[in-house]
Image (cartoon, coloured by chain):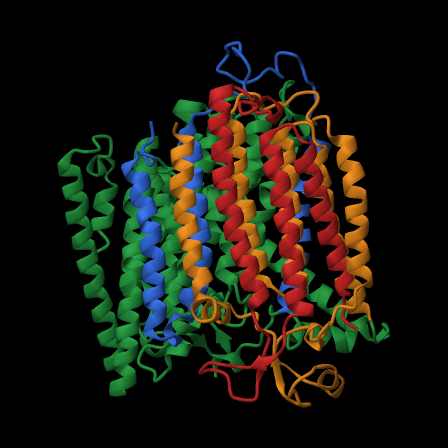
Chain colours: A red, B blue, C green, D orange
Amino acid sequence: MAMIPLWWYLMVAAGLFTIGLYGALVRKNAVSVLMGIELMLNAVNVNAVAFWRYVSPTAKAAAGADRPVGDFVVGMDGQVFAVVVIALAAAEAAVGLAMVIALYRSRRSFNLPQMDQLQG
Amino acid sequence: MVDNWGFIAVLTLVAFTVPLIGLALSWLLRPHRPGPIKQTTYECGLETIGDSWVQFKVQYYLYALIFVLFDVETVFLYPWAVAFLGLPLFALVEMVIFLGILAIGLIYAWRKGALEWV
Amino acid sequence: MMMELMPVWLQAGAGNPLREFLLENILTGLSEAWRPLVADLLTWSLTCALIMGIVQVTMLYCTLLERKFVGRIQDRIGPNRVGYWGLLQPFADMVKMLTKEDITPAVAHRSVYNLGAILVVPPAIMVFAILPLSLGLVASDLSVGFLYFISVASVVIVPIFMAGWGSRNKFALIGAMRAVAQTVSYEIPQVLSVVGVLLLAGSLSTGDIILAQGTVGSGAQASQGFPGGWFILTQPIAFVIYLMATTAEVERTPFDIPEAESEIIAGYHTEYAGIKFGLFQLSQYFMTIASAALGSVLFLGGWMSPFPGGLLQTLGPLNLGFFWMGAKTLLLILGFMWLRGTWPRLRSDQLMGFAWKVLVPLSLANLLITALLGWLLHGWWNASGAQGLGRSAVVVVAFLAANGLLLFGAMLGFGRLRAKGGRPDIRFEATGVGSSVEGAA
Amino acid sequence: MSQQTVVQLVFGVMAALSLGGAMGVVMARTVFVSALWLILSFVGVAGLYITLGAGFLAVIQVLVYVGAISVLILFAIMLTEDVMGDEHPNNGQVGLAIILLTPLIFLLGKWGFTANWPVKAAAILPRSGLSVDAATAAALPGALKTGDAFLVPDSVAYLGRVLMTEHFLAFEVVSVVLLVALVGAIVIARD
């Protein structure tokens, strides 16, 4: 009866995740690999928020001064999860791209197949 | 809530039509006589030397980096600020710790010269 | 009480009289399933048309006003040939832009180049959704209103980057890089300065923020806002930071390094001609107007009359909210133009250093002081039961004193930093910007 | 009925934006264009959040992903010379990736579609502040009665309170993570 069934969101998230993983696996370019990882994180977030809206919210008695007892609010766990994931994605992108830049500087290349210093 | 976003959806469509209408009108009215000299890259009358897609210095990236982290910080700052006056003092302490940790980051960046434009 | 005077004409959904009228008189032939939806869509479209009309006309005459105003500052007359007092000049400009030949550089990345020009406009229009014209006259009073504005406005950097990169011109790309670096640097002080206001208002919605500024002397609870009147009184430093950061955000002089015409031709829109160039100008003016309107919402009480006791808030049956809102917005726009007419352009390093080394620490300190003082004052009147004008006076005086102290400390701190000579390339006094901080006291 | 059609249409557009953008990311030959597709995908995901009733997250998605992370990516691309990419942006793992990912998407789809997720009635309520009707009360486990106010809080203040009380540890850890990322990235990027 919901306007949009839950599984629609799950399908989109699955698609995003798979495409992101594909990008991360097949791209030579390090920045593109990071973009694939960002897509995967987005997929995770879509799932988290969809589950927050559809499944997780065991209604709990509202706490706090401005809500009368007897009202029920939906928990915010899924949203908090998504916000933290966004923050971590930002940190990941910052460090990851810094590494790309550092590698580029030492190898004059963007491409991961050439980053083989550790190969014996 | 639903209504508000519905309006924004309509406004988005309208917002995209505005530049398209402008372009369409101009396409009807303007002359079109391209030439090889006209279509050269504008560089004060000189020939362009080398590729125009030049490499930039790392300073730009450092600014963007600090920006991203502070942008994420504001994401946490806004819900806190809005809720603040209904919360106990504990919330203020938490936020002072949060801001303090990030201020250390800013000071570090400052000391390391990441804020210098060279 | 005032809400009853003013029906929610622009408010989406049920309760909008226009929507009710459409439902009852026009759309009677439709099936029950579609009637409300079509009514909604029609109402929204009409609202969009209204907003677009107002914004377009304001934009057109802002260009004229700016040329006249800057002209007067520079002892010129400004445009006066087309129409009486140059009143038809904007339309002449428009016709010129439309009929000019469009030149695309042969080496440009065509799709990115063209999309850049198209995409720069929609965000500048979309931000108007949350700006109220008057009481009850806000198209979309989102609960995340202010954040919506900031995030949609921040999208503009993407088309700017597309323009710079797609042109495949060194100057365009340098301009785009500068534009983005500057925009993102000043976005931080902009959002940080407003946090104090949001903390006192207790909401991100523009409607609530304005209402929170109308509680001078009332017995309102903290949940309905802080009883300090307009936020320019309790947050003067934040106001000045907001204005400076906004000027940089919309890339106006003295922060127009991205398009510094004497250095990099015209920045990211070097290669654009005719209407595409016009679209960039359009977007910039829209953003200027929207930022000024947001500034008046955040700090100047939005549609509220500046007189005590709501004098001249209504004239007979007419609510003058739109007049006050317009007047305050115009005031801030004139402020931007004044800046443009009188200040020299900053240097890149001064610009970036100023954002990160002055504005960000200052707004962080302001935020902490606001939180602490807000908490203390809140506790004080809860404990003492203070109410009315006396309480408002205490609040305003306390905040003004705190802001003064903060300013004094900041001047001292930055002065010492400079005196140490650790960073010879930051010369606040040379930019003149330090003195404008001083002027906020 | 009709409103449902429109909402589903909006969902369809947003899903198409996010998935199409994602396809663009992995298909584009130029890194810069790839990044532009990524931005489109981010916008689509923000739209999905709106259809889920998470307005704050949608706005944050645009602010952080479109306004900030994409800037980081674009700058990183600009810092390197070969912005045009090359003719062969993929490595030799395309076939292998497709072989691996086909069962993955199949399994994810199967689980998403067939698993019996315990969907709560809260999802049915289109907006906050609605009273609980009889059907909802029957569908919800727990002490919900018909007529109770049931709030799906879109309020940012509520999120703030939750962050400050229940989830304060995550909140503080995020600040440490951001600090570490800042220091680490500065050290790495400047030699």
Q: Which corner quadrant holds the C terminus of chain B?
A: top left
x 60%, y 71%: residue:
C9
x 53%, y 22%: residue:
A117
- The tally of labels here is 0
Q: Position of residue C105 (x, y in %)?
A: 62, 20
Q: Which of D18 and C309 is in front in this view?
A: D18
Q: Position of residue C60 (x, y in %)?
A: 52, 45
- Residue C239 visible in the current orientation: no
Q: Which corner quadrant holds the N terminus of chain B?
A: bottom right
Left or right of residue C403, residue B48 in this image: right
Splitting the image into 4 quarters, where does residue C330 fall?
A: bottom left
Splitting the image into 4 quarters, where does residue C210 fall?
A: bottom left
Left or right of residue D106, residue A67 in this image: left
Splitting the image into 4 quarters, where does residue C18 fall?
A: bottom right
Q: Nearer the viewer, residue D81 or C39?
A: D81
Q: Position of residue A43 (x, y in %)?
A: 66, 51
Location of residue B39 with respect to D36 vertically, above or below: above
Q: Position of residue C421 (x, y in %)?
A: 16, 33
- Residue A110 visible in the current orientation: yes
